[in-house]
Amino acid sequence: MLKESLDKYKRIVEIRKEFGAIASLASDLGNDELAKEAEDDGETSHYKPEQYLVNAGWQRWSNLFERVVLACAYPGKPTAEISIKTHDAIVGKKYKKDEGKGYRAFLNVLILFSLMKYLEMEGTYRPGLLILDSPILSLKEKRGMWKEGDRADLGMRESLFQYLIDNCGKNQIIIAENEIPNSPKMDYSKAKLIAFGEKAGREGFLMEPNDTL
């Protein structure tokens, strides 16, 4: 009886040693894999996607961006392009970095939208999703033309929203905005509006058990 118990105890000790060896081996393999991934990340950190977009493709994206700029009622109906040298927008022969904060935000939306549409039409892989946070809230005219705090004209804001709605295509665009253009000419029938706030009965993005979309 005692001998049987001793044999069982020895066997348990041996099994635990085997498990320990397996765990140690698994840990070593995991560390090797992490090291390999780190090496791979180091190699891919130099990846330059613009090298794979030929000049003709770059020009098609640039042309699409210009059409979007004009359609969204940008002041002065300027020429517009995506520079292959700076990888950024030039509107009316003025670099985006030289625009005011509000106009830079507005142009960033148009750059992202035009890129999304370009990938939809010509990309092998396309995300099909664009998420925008307050694309018009901070939009302001140049200081001196309007009182400080005034935003760009209503037509510019309306054109942006209506263009995004009408030309979304097979993509999904999610916009978080404190105030949307709401004149009679706006058509939100193709969009799904979700209001937040105390009056709307839903405080934020996270839903309560009784909330409905």
Image (spheres, helix red, strand yellow):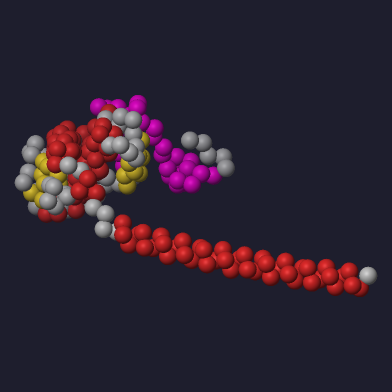
Please say whether residue 111 is visible from this viewpoint: yes
Quadrant containing the N terminus in the rendered view = bottom right
Against 120, residue 89 (above or below) is: below
For image coordinates 22% across by 38% down, the residue present is: 114
Residue 65 located left or right of residue 167: left
Against 65, residue 144 (above or below) is: below
Against 60, residue 187 (above or below) is: above
Residue 205 located left or right of residue 57: right
Q: Position of residue 145 (x, y in %)?
A: 9, 48
Q: Position of residue 104 (x, y in %)?
A: 19, 50
Residue placed most toward the observer, 170 or 153 = 170
> Where are the magenta residues, as a range?
179-208
Q: Position of residue 157 (x, y in %)?
A: 22, 38
Q: Place residue 124 in its image quadrant.
A: top left
Say if the magenta span includes residue 124: no
Say if the magenta span includes residue 191: yes
For image coordinates 14% across by 44% down, the residue present is: 82
